[in-house]
Amino acid sequence: MDGPMTREVKPMLQVYNTLTRRKEPFPKQPGETVTMYVCGPTVYKPSHIGHMVGPVIFDTVKRYLTYLGFSVRWVVNITDVDDKLIARSAELGTTVPALAQRMTEDYFECLKQLNVTGVDAFPRATEHIGGMIRMIGHLIAKGYAYPAGGSVWFDVSKDEDYGKLCNRDPEQMAEGGRIEPNPHKRNPGDFALWKGAKPGEPPEVTWESPWGPGRPGWHIECSVMSTTLLGETIDIHGGGLDLKFPHHENELAQSESATGKTFARIWMHNGLLKLRSKEGKEDKMAGSIGNVLNVADALKHVSGEVLRFFILNTHYTSPIDLGVWDREKDPIPTSIEAARKAYATFERLAERYQRITGTAFHELKAPTRASTDYPPPLRDFQQRFRHHMDDDFNTGGATAVLFELASFLNRTADTGKLESAQDLDSPEGQVFRQGAMLLKELGQILGLFWSAPASLALGADGQLVGGLMQLLIDLRNNLRAEAKKIPGKDDPAKKALFAQTDLIRQRLAELGIVLEDRPTGTTWRRA
Ligand SMILES: [Zn+2]
């Protein structure tokens, strides 16, 4: 076999820790339980693509840790009480709980569409108000917090290592400009643990407390849900880079002051989406700029698998560049369109696999833990994939290995002239079968290959339709090849052949099918 050279790579997971600002060996051994808490959404509007970055990345982290033999317990909170929820529900003329419920359902549906299946619990902030009141009381008793003006504040000057996550001192952070001034605060950097009720706020966002009616601050919600569900010390705390300060710094300060223990062993922060307007200005995705791409709208143009693949193409610590998006011209950014085209490589291979074996690639039952010993040409792909994932979950490098494995499988099918199930007993047939299993095994670590390619997702006749489409594509390509052999531009025979190829394209378009010609071959999709 013409496989790449085999070399041994010792698996050794390294993870970048924001707290220490370096890559560290993962602190646990396979077989042990890993606890992971990731800050979830404030549910006041539908999820856009940016909201899916964290879930997809940490779902992949869990899948890889599981593959290595860890048992992972993962919690994502739902913030269902917040200023934004109060304002938005008033605008819509609905209640906070009703809006929160609707937007939570939207969020869950988006997770499902992107195959984010690993979350073990979704605690809602309003279910843990009692625990928050207890932790705040505890912080007051220990001298870390003080009630003033109907609210309770955390005193940053009492916490000696406040600022250690961001590596800044409290004064610098106060200058960051994101701190609200309040006459009751002792220090500018103090933040609210409990917010006294304001006149006119609806009763469903107000709870009784020893300090008067009000509601919890955002940061204390995560400290309480994390310690309640996962214990005082967790292994991984994750979230978007925009949450590092003040949210995570404050979560850390409250939790460690309350328990006297390390709150999180590793802090992982994912990069955010960035995009540019057609004028070239760099923007974030925000309703105020009018460049929001909701997940539900994106899914009208590309599959959830392609969106997931697009997110994982970039290393999680880097920003995900959506590129220029002229939304008047393009329904989705061209970068996502490019991901869709690249992903077609795997869809074509899945179609080929189905033609040869008579079974669906996405239904292959591949192991979810590293167990199978693959023969040398395949083992090398597996080792290089793991090598990338061991390097701080480098999913971009890992997907590159999947592309190499896919072309290796195509070459194997070409050399072995694999056409049907009868050919699978040949040496090439066996490598093809095992290699497809490995591709599925590695792909599902990234949460890919769970659904049938569009061309095969056509119900009971899917395979027949896929086969007929391939027949038309082959005939059209033969006609084109014949036409190109005829010299000159105006030869009538040449024109007649091209007229036939145009007719095929046109008649398929009338049936709602688009043909796409690329250097690597022709594919089709539904318009
Ligand atoms: Zn949080």
Image: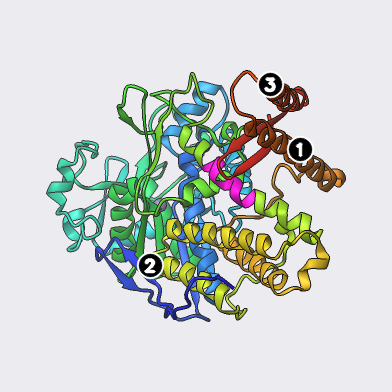
| Magenta stretch bounds | 339-347
Tell me: 157 left or right of 276: left
Distance from label 1 to label 2 (Cα)? 46 Å
Q: Nearer the viewer, residue 74 or 80?
A: 74
Image x and y of residue 183, in percent: 19, 36
Image x and y of residue 136, in percent: 35, 56
Q: Nearer the viewer, residue 130 or 123?
A: 123
Distance from label 1 to label 3 (Cα)? 16 Å
Q: Answer above or below: position of 21 versus 455.
A: below
The mark lying in front, picked from 1 and 2, is 1
Asked if the magenta segment contains residue 346, the reply would be yes
Q: Which mark, by number, is residue 391?
A: 2
Q: Residue at x 51, y 25 (%)?
A: 330
Q: Which mark, by number, is residue 495?
A: 3
Q: Nearer the viewer, residue 202 or 302?
A: 302
Q: Nearer the viewer, residue 7 or 266?
A: 7
* Nearest to N terminus: mark 1 or mark 2: 2
The mark lying in front, picked from 2 and 3, is 3
